[in-house]
Image: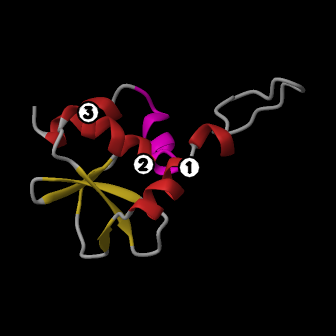
Amino acid sequence: MNPKSLIKALRETDDYIEKIYLNGGCYQFYKFLKAVYPKAVPYLSQDKQHVVTKICSCFYDITGRVSGRFHILMEMSDIKMCEKWSFCKNNWLFRDCPNCGEYVSA
């Protein structure tokens, strides 16, 4: 399966998938793609806030194929930094607050 089709299929599994992989889970998304495409390589945005995955000559994130020359090959220090990123440590997905029942948008 080509990367665009795989990413699209994953993204369509749940409304939260894109939120997770764009808000702290982008490095984990690279690791998912690496499991499917062993030659995948992680690249970092110039501001060091987002990881994209290079497969063959194209870059991908959860939105699909991305373009631009703002990606830099990750070094070990970058990988150590990104391994600490986590959606679940900084966000939550409840629609209703478990304590007061108030509606909270995800």
The residue wearing badge 3 is 35
Q: Could you tell me the amino acid type at mark 2? A: Tyr
Say which amino acid is labelled 1. Trp
Q: Secondary structure at mark 2?
A: helix
Splitting the image into 4 quarters, where does residue 32 fall?
Answer: top left
Instruction: Identify the residue at image location x=43%, y=49%.
Output: 26
User: Is 99 drawn above or below residue 88 in the view shown?
Assistant: above
- Residue at 46%, 33% in the rendered image: 15
Few, some or many residues within 10 Å of mark 1 (<14, 14–19, 20+): some
User: Can residue 91 be spotted in the picture?
Assistant: no
Left or right? Give the position of 95 relative to 19.
right
Q: Earlier in the sequence, mark 2 or mark 3?
A: 2
- Residue 14 place in picture, x, y as percent: 43, 27
**Which dot marks residue 85?**
1
Q: Residue 85 at x, y = what percent?
A: 56, 49
Q: Residue at x 90, y 27 (%)?
A: 100
Contact (Cβ within 8 Å) of mark 1 with mark 2: yes
Q: Residues within 10 Å of mark 3 (few under 14, many from 20)?
A: few
